[in-house]
Image: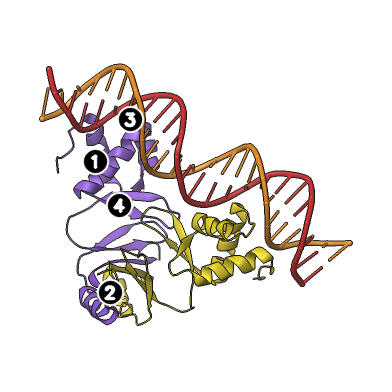
Chain colours: A yellow, B purple, C orange, D red
Amino acid sequence: MTPMRATRQREHVLERLGQAPTPLSAQELFVDLRAAGTPVALATVYRQLQGLAEEGVADRLVRDTGEVAFRLCASGHHHHLICDSCGRVEEVRDCRLDRWASHLASEHGFRDVAHAAEFHGTCQDCG
Amino acid sequence: MTPMRATRQREHVLERLGQAPTPLSAQELFVDLRAAGTPVALATVYRQLQGLAEEGVADRLVRDTGEVAFRLCASGHHHHLICDSCGRVEEVRDCRLDRWASHLASEHGFRDVAHAAEFHGTCQDCG
DNA sequence: GTCACTGCAAACATTTTGCATGCTA
DNA sequence: TAGCATGCAAAATGTTTGCAGTGAC
């Protein structure tokens, strides 16, 4: 897979995404960048985010509303603990679902069972 | 919460949703119903599905594409084991995440931590 | 110099909403 | 009969795409 070219827009998207405390949608990122004085087109933001996700640089997550949000992400398997109040996201690297997944696989006759899990609550600052 | 009225459209939505082997989006359900000769408006399907989800009669799940799909669902806490090939969904009632969730809550200083988990794989018939 | 990336606008898809009418309770 | 549900069409979102021009390599 050929990596994307290093354009000015890509730099800005990466920088802003790296600073963001919470996952951002293309729309939000677009507004952010424009507000910061960075000239960029909405379509470019969409294309960049899509590219970053394909390269594995960013995590693509679908919100309950159906909007798609992105977040720079350390590689490797992990889950998210999300504050419903402020949107803050903490990564949970210690995964305890693999064993259960294997169990379900054999019990239900499935194979290659992957899993996705998400935790929601209220964080200390908001609590 | 006042339950919805028993209209002809509601009956049809419920019936079709009950027969469906996989979760259906409003669009899909709309096409299905029309194909079956049931006169119904798209907006009505959207409103019915939304109502059913609020009443807890149907499960609302967001696809990776961002589309929202619905499925009649037994009440109570449970998770889904989904076949990536045929879309078949099996319910998993035996939940082993509560303890982990509590653990994460105290470790990260969160409270009221709920969780959502989904398993994906290939089922026996498709495997 | 080539070809990927960008910007813009138009097209698309999904979902929501306003309003007059019909039907359930 | 009162008021929720429906149908239709318009509008609001969120996202993708076509095409000409620009810039990275």
Do badges 1 and 3 share one subunit?
Answer: yes
Do badges 1 and 2 share one subunit?
Answer: no
Q: Is residue D5 left or right of residue A49?
A: left
The three-letter amino acid code for the residue at tag 2 is Gln
Measured from the top left, where is residue A106 in percent x and y?
A: 29, 74
Q: Dot 1 lies on which element?
A: helix
Q: Residues within 10 Å of mark 2 (few under 14, many from 20)?
A: few
Give the Cα distance between marks 2 and 4. 29 Å
Residue placed under numbered mark 2 in the picture = A124
Residue placed under numbered mark 3 in the picture = B40
Q: Dot 2 lies on which element?
A: loop
Report in which chain the residue with disc 3 lies.
B
The image quarter containing residue B103 is: bottom left
Q: Dot 4 lies on which element?
A: strand
Give the Cα distance between marks 4 and 3. 21 Å
Residue placed under numbered mark 1 in the picture = B14
Q: Is residue B91 left or right of residue A12?
A: left
Residue placed under numbered mark 4 in the picture = B60
Report in which chain the residue with disc 1 lies.
B
Measured from the top left, where is residue D6 in percent x and y?
A: 29, 28
Q: B41 or B100, which lies in front?
A: B100
Q: Residues within 10 Å of mark 3 (few under 14, many from 20)?
A: some
Q: Residues within 10 Å of mark 4 (few under 14, many from 20)?
A: many
Give the Cα distance between marks 4 and 1. 14 Å
Q: Marks 4 and 1: which is nearer the front?
A: 4
The three-letter amino acid code for the residue at tag 3 is Val
